[in-house]
Image (tube, grey):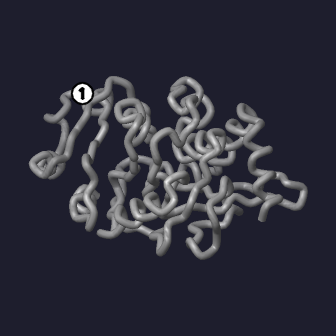
């Protein structure tokens, strides 16, 4: 994954990897040499005490760089070399939106009940949609967050670890909607990526095949009932 980030047609100002000392108690000594080699290319490794799981990719950067454009990436994904350029170009054209390569379309039944996650329209193309709260970005596919585009509660660790501990995608989407930031799917978007297998049970298996996404979505909608109002208003404008 890291090689693909350093091989972009447009390079970011920084590439930062946040790691928890709970997972790697010996810090750099715990890391493979293949990872440490990227330090010479400019990779920054920042150590944090707590383990916020997949939330690490964005939460700490939001604290450290509140006035900067932030783009998420996963450590198990290979990104095409124009991946970042397309995100940034979309931002320059429409700076008020959050921009994503891969997003699913949230769907409701005829009674405006939220359909299960598996029944959403997956991996939509930019030709299928316009900027909307109904576009659900997946952070591993690459999401660009303009400064101040998420609700202030985004940093509420206790709440997101209680409501959706294994689904940062759900939390960050909810914080975008609550703040009023619509999600745009970038032109000629990439929605499939090559990647590497992690050891252990991947989040995809836990959240998708075991339907844990639906449990965490229910938690979010119960805690923030105003989300439903924003989404149904979006349905009326389609």
Q: Residue at x 64, y 69 (%)?
A: 129
Determine whether, in the image, residue 215 is placed left or right of residue 172.
Answer: right
Between 136 and 30, the residue placed more toward the observer is: 136
Q: Position of residue 219 (x, y in %)?
A: 69, 36
Residue 131 lies left or right of residue 193; in this view the side is: right
Locate residue 198, reporting x and y percent: 36, 52
| Crowd around label 1: few <14 · some 14–19 · many ≥20 (10 Å) | few
Residue topped by disc 1 = 25
Residue 207, x across and y down, in percent: 57, 49
From the viewer's side, name the closer residue of 95 and 110: 95
Does residue 195 appear in this view?
A: no
Looking at the image, which residue is at 42% across and 61% down? 87
- Of 191 and 144, nearer the camera is 144
Residue 163, picture quadrant: top right
46 vs 178, nearest the viewer? 178
For the point 40% across and 66% down, the residue is 86
The quadrant the N terminus occupies is bottom left
Q: Is residue 8 above or below residue 179?
A: below
Q: Residue furthest right?
A: 111
Can you say which quadrant of the picture contains the C terminus? bottom right
In the image, taking residue 38 as reference, residue 160 lies left or right, namely right
Q: Tag 1, which secondary structure?
A: loop
Residue 211 % position (x, y):
65, 50
Vertical position of residue 150 compared to residue 158: above or below: below
| Residue 237 seen from this side | yes
Residue drawn at x 19%, y 46% as measured from the top left = 43
Is residue 14 toward the left or the right of residue 159 in the image? left
């Amino acid at each position: 994954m890291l090689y693909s980030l350093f091989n972009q047609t447009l390079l970011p100002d920084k590439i930062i990897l946040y790691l928890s000392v709970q997972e790697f108690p010996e810090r750099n000594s715990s890391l493979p040499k293949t990872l440490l080699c990227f330090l010479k290319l400019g990779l920054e490794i920042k150590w944090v005490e707590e383990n916020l799981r997949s939330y690490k990719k964005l939460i700490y950067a939001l604290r450290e760089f509140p006035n900067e454009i932030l783009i998420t990436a996963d450590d198990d994904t290979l990104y095409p070399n124009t991946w970042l350029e397309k995100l940034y170009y979309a931002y320059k054209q429409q700076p008020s939106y959050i921009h994503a390569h891969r997003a699913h379309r949230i769907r409701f039944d005829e009674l405006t009940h939220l359909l299960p996650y598996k029944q959403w329209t997956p991996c939509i193309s930019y030709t299928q949609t316009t900027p909307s709260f109904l576009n659900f970005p997946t952070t591993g596919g690459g999401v660009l967050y303009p400064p101040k585009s998420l609700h202030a509660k985004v940093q509420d660790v206790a709440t997101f670890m209680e409501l959706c501990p294994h689904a940062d995608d759900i939390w960050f989407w909810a914080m975008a909607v609550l703040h009023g930031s619509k999600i745009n799917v970038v032109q000629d978007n990439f929605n499939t990526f090559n990647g590497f297998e992690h050891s252990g049970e991947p989040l995809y298996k836990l959240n998708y095949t075991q339907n844990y996404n639906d449990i965490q979505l229910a938690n979010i909608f119960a805690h923030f009932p105003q989300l439903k109002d924003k989404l149904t208003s979006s349905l009326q404008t389609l």
